[in-house]
Image (cartoon, helix red, strand yellow):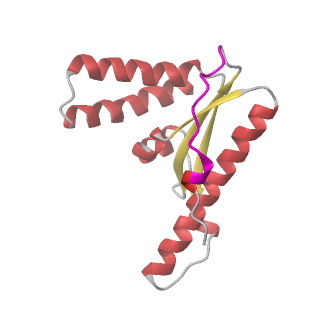
Amino acid sequence: MKTQLADAMAEDFERDLRRDGVAPEKIQTQITRSKERINSAPLIVLLCLDMSEMDSYPDAKRRQAERTMAMQSVAAAGLQLLLAAHAEGLGGVWVCAPLFAQETIQKTLNLSDSWEPQGMFFIGYANELPKEKTMKDLQSLIKWL
């Protein structure tokens, strides 16, 4: 299934890169890396948005607010999943490639039309520890009112 998914997503990715005028050798490098990431992941979790259980409103403003709330809920659930994986000693990588291949993923995995792929996690044991990142000073991110 991972190979089918990687191949199907690669077709969309390649088509988009060609449209963008990316050089053929760079396209091949990116496609190879993308497929390798999917195929080598011990576990893949696909995060989907499903609006079928959300409230429905007659006006566009509230419909958009409901959709935004649902997207935030998907993201919050994804964060919790990454934290749970980390607590179990696992590593995880969140990729948003599914946003660019929603229909392809739905078709390949035979998902309901109401399941809109939003993100994908590659989860497993890390081969190496990630480099420590420099964090911004907290005070530079806060505005006190």
Instruction: State which quarter of the image contains the N terminus.
Output: top right
The answer to whether 85 appears left or right of 79 in the picture is right
Rendered location of residue 38, percent (x, y): 53, 25
Given the current orientation, which residue lies at the most extreme right position? 88
Q: Report which quarter residue 14 is drawn in.
A: top left
Q: Which residues are magenta?
A: 128-139
State the count of labels. Answer: 0
- Magenta span includes 54: no
- Magenta span includes 129: yes
Residue occupying image coordinates x 68% and y 51%? 77
Rendered location of residue 94, percent (x, y): 57, 37
Instruction: State which quarter of the image contains the C terminus.
Output: bottom right
Residue occupying image coordinates x 45% and y 39%? 97
In the rendered image, the vertical position of residue 64 relative to residue 86, given as above or below: below
Frontmost residue, 128 versus 107: 128
In the rendered image, the vertical position of residue 81 relative to residue 34, given as above or below: below
Frontmost residue, 143 versus 58: 143
Residue occupying image coordinates x 50% and y 76%? 63
Rendered location of residue 105, percent (x, y): 48, 41
Given the current orientation, which residue lies at the most extreme left position? 21
Prevalent SS, magenta region: loop
Given the current orientation, which residue lies at the most extreme top position? 127
Residue occupying image coordinates x 49% and y 31%? 5
Q: Report which quarter residue 127 is drawn in.
A: top right
